Image (spheres, rainbow, N blue to C red):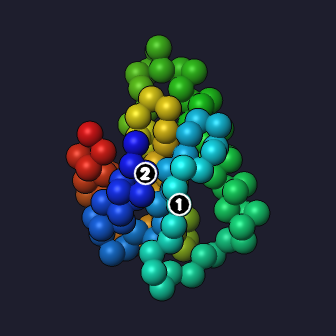
Amino acid sequence: MDYKSIHERIMNLDPRIRLVTICDLNGKIMHSDHRVGVENMLSSEESKKSLELAVNAWKTRSTLQSKIGKGKYVLAEYEKIKRITMPLDEEHILYITTEVDADHSKIIDSARRETR
């Protein structure tokens, strides 16, 4: 899988996307980068912890999929950013952060189309 190409396609969907990370279900980062000119709000360790929490939450929710269906995405909205977690495929997750004013529904729908 060409993770860099996927990253670039997702990043190009909207200028309000701050970060795109692709990782496996163990949290191993396949590709990750911020938009040029965007300052990271978290330290390297805090970023790793945030990703770890998102991956673990995704795996926990997946244990319920036989009853509620497969997860499509999770949106966490904070005062300063939005964070979208969604499946790339059965073994990989897209972790996207955006500006608060980003149209997350449009980004989610476009990301789905770009990764099929």
Q: Mark 2 points at which residue?
A: 3
Residue 11 % position (x, y): 36, 65
Under mark 2, the amino acid is Tyr
Q: Residue at x 41, y 22 (%)?
A: 69
Residue 99 % position (x, y): 44, 72
Q: Which residue is drawn at 68% across and 71% down?
A: 42
Q: Which of marks 1 and 2 is nearer the N terminus?
A: 2
Q: How crowded is mark 1: few (under 14 residues within 10 Å), some or many (20 or more)?
A: some
Under mark 1, the amino acid is Ser
Instruction: Describe the element under mark 2 as helix, strand or loop.
Output: helix
Q: How crowded is mark 2: few (under 14 residues within 10 Å), some or many (20 or more)?
A: some
Q: Name the residue under label 1.
A: 32
Identify the residue at the far front of this view.
Answer: 2
- Closer-to-camera residue (45/107): 45
**Is 42 left, or right, of 78 in this rendering?**
right
Disc nearest the viewer among 1 and 2? 2
Tally of numbered tags: 2
Spatial distance from mark 1 to mark 2, Cα to Cα? 9 Å
- Closer-to-camera residue (6/70): 6
Is 104 situated above or below 39? above
- Closer-to-camera residue (27/14): 27
Instruction: Describe the element under mark 1 as helix, strand or loop.
Output: strand
